[in-house]
Image: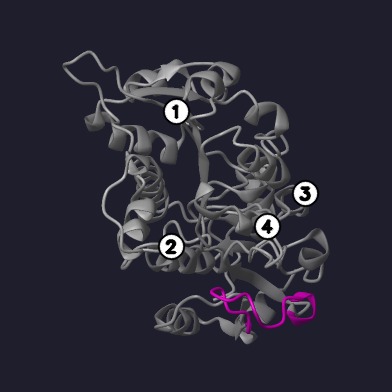
Amino acid sequence: MRSGKECILSKPKVFIYTPVDQTGDSHRQLKSAGCDLKLGDVSWHKLDGDLNIIDDVADDTAALVGVAVRKIPITREVMLKSPELRIVAKYTVGTDDVDVEAATELGILVTHCPTEANWSGVAEGAMALMLTLLKKVRERDQYVKDGNWRDESLQGTYLGRRQDGYEGITIGIIGLGRIGSRLADLLAPWRVQLIAYDPYKGDQQFIHHNVERVELNELLAEADVVTLHTNLTQETRGLMGVTELVKMKETAYLLNTSRGAVVDENALFDALDKNQIAGAAIDVFEEEPLPKQSALLGLGNKILLSPHVITFNVGAGLTTAIPWATEHVIQAMKGEVPEHAYNEAVIDRWVERFGGQSLL
């Protein structure tokens, strides 16, 4: 650890390995605060550039900053490169590209940015994907462009409860956290039947959002749409595999806007190819960018694909997260515990190591 004299003489090194601030405002803010800033050459949009960042991490790097890119994992090896590392600050909500367990063991804070523009954007995006599938938006568009006009095959699905006795469709939400809850709220005026599975939430969460609590197998059997809103953990990796997909209705749709590895893509391909389910909409993939040889690309309108941009909205998405992550870094450089620590278990040890020791 640096002595007080060294703290004054040298600026803390901050390495933004995936720059996303096109305005440069946050870079100027970090420099103005007294940080020695280094920018990586990886493009978040295209994921090109040098993806091996370990050689770019100086042995006195105090902060790593970037987006969640699984091709650039922040591993134990990366973090061990610098004994001075205080924080891994993510612009994103997800932290599955960071070895959080190793960070906690090493006394390093991991912060993330659960901005409403981000998590609510996921809920809105899931709603858009759902309506696109249920109302056959793509099929109707293409039918007219092909020179046709009306056909029985273009009938969509009516969502909500009606006075003629139609009960409405059932939406099954897996994961009733921020995103799942907001989606439930967005769906409420549509008069659909809402069910959800989340073993980590109390009954009050379900009651507050007018959602019926069910077990996973019941949800899969009853839902006309199954929509995934879970974190990627050891428990949720491969959550939707062969066993789960076969339990869904043949007329049901699957939406995944959470993390690619939550769904077994081979099992999903087989289920769609064999018409075991009606369709799917996927914004996240096990490997990103989606390989050009992926079998999912050959499924036509059975699957709606999106390039992990579900929160990519004007004035939202990462735009609102950049000030948060920047402030997280500045607070950590000042020896203050920043907001939105993902690994809260490390805070006490972090305070012992860095608390009150300002590098600025």
Instruction: Determine the secondary structure under disc 2.
Output: helix
Q: Nearer the viewer, mark 2 or mark 4?
A: 4
Marks 3 and 4 sit apart, C-alpha to C-alpha, by: 17 Å
What residue is at 22 percent from the left and 31 percent from the top?
A: 189
Type of amino acid under label 4: Asp
Upstream in sequence: badge 3 or badge 1: 3
Point out the stretch of residues depicted in magenta. 40-56
Is residue 175 a member of the stretch shown in magenta? no
Disc 2 marks a residue whose amino acid type is Trp
Badge 3 is on which residue? 105
Q: Residue at x 55, y 50 (%)?
A: 341
Find out whether the residues at labels 3 and 1 contact each other: C-beta distance under 8 Å: no
Q: Is mark 3 on a helix, strand or loop?
A: helix
Sequence order check, earlier mark of 3 and 4: 4
Asked if residue 152 lies left or right of residue 251, the reply is left
Q: Name the residue under label 2.
A: 324
